Image (cartoon, rainbow, N blue to C red):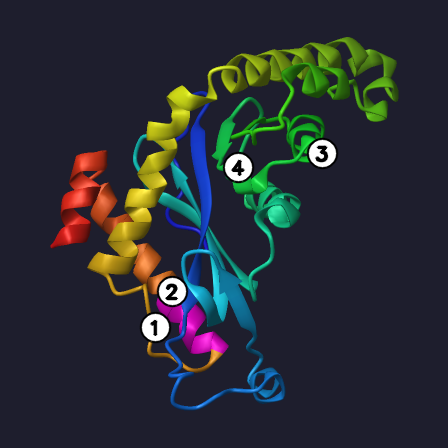
Amino acid sequence: MNTKPLKRRGKLTFIVDATPVDLDYNVKRKHRSKKHLEKRDLKWSYSSSYGFYIGFKATIVIEKKSAMPVAIIIHSGAPHDSKIFSEIMENLRKRRIIRKNDTIIFDRGYYSYKNYQIGISKYKIVPLIFPKENFKIQKLNDKLTYPLQVFNDKKTEKQSKQLYNTLKNQLLKKISKWKKYKPIRGKIEDFFKLCKSGLSLKKLHKYTPESAKRTTILIVFLAGLITTTGYTTKTDLQKLSET
C-alpha cells in the first residue's frame, strides 16, 4: 500500500518496523486446528509481545520527518524480521519510494551482516540496522567489499566505487553512534501505539485474511492522515494514542 507521493528534496530517512496483527479468535473457548486455519488461509503465529496468536505480521514504513506511512507490507504468519529484509527493500525499490543515498533505520530484529551488504550493494542506501551484542564494526568493514557488478562496466566503475565508499563510510559512522538514533526509531513505536490504542489495531474482529488486511491498511491510512495534519512529534503521537 502506498500513500500520497513524497515531496522529495534531497536525501530522506525512513523508519521500518513490524507489528503482529491479532484477529482476536477466542482460542480459549474454542481451539482452531492447523487444518481448520489452512482452509481460511490463516496460521498460528508467535510474537514475544503477544505470545501465540492467529493473524499476520504488518511491516510499516514511515518517513522520519513527517511520520507519514509510505508503505505497508502484509506477511502471512510471523516470519523473522531478518529474513524479510530483502522483501521489504524490493517493495520500496519497485514503488520508487527509496532513492540512492537515503537512510533506512531498522531495529536489531533485522540484524545480519548480509543485510548491511545487501542494503549498500543492491539498493544503494544506508541500512542503519541496530546491531546486536556480538556485533564487530571491524568485521562489518571487512565484509563491505565492492560487489562484482562494479567491475562490469569500466565507464562507470569509478563512479560506482565512489558511491559504494560514500554509503559504506556513512553506515560505519552512523552505526558507531547507533544509540543516538534510538529516539528517532522510537517514532514508529509511537505510530504503532496510535494505530493500536487510538485506532483499535491491537485486536481486529475480522475472521478472513482479506477483510483483516483491508482493515489494517485503512487504520494505517487513517493514522497517516492524522500525522499529515501536524501531529508528527513523539509527544503528539503519544498524546493521540492515549485519547
* Amino acid bearing label 4: Arg
Q: Which residue is mark 1?
A: 204
Of tags 3 and 2, the one toward the viewer is 3
Q: Are marks 1 and 3 in contact (CB under 8 Å)?
A: no
Q: Are marks 4 and 2 in contact (CB under 8 Å)?
A: no
Of tags 4 and 2, the one toward the viewer is 4
Q: CA distance from mark 1 to mark 2?
A: 8 Å
Say which element carries label 3. helix
Which residue is rendered at x = 58% and y = 25% of the image? 100
Say if residue 152 shows up in the picture. Answer: yes
Say which element carries label 1. loop
Task: Tell me if residue 213 is in the magenta stretch.
Answer: yes
Q: CA distance from mark 4 to mark 3?
A: 13 Å
Q: CA distance from mark 1 to mark 3?
A: 35 Å
Q: Is residue 65 above or below residue 40?
A: above
Counting residues from the start of the chain, the first of labels 4 and 2 encountered is 4
Counting residues from the start of the chain, the first of labels 3 and 2 encountered is 3
Q: Which residue is mark 4?
A: 108
Majority SS type along the magenta span: helix
Q: Is residue 219 above or below residue 166?
A: below
Please tell me the numbered disc located at residue 114: 3
* Amino acid bearing label 3: Lys
In percent of width and height, residue 145 lies at: 78, 18
> What are the residue bounds of the magenta stretch?
209-215
Q: Residues within 10 Å of mark 2 (few under 14, many from 20)?
A: many
Q: Is residue 156 above or below residue 8?
A: above
* Amino acid bearing label 1: Leu
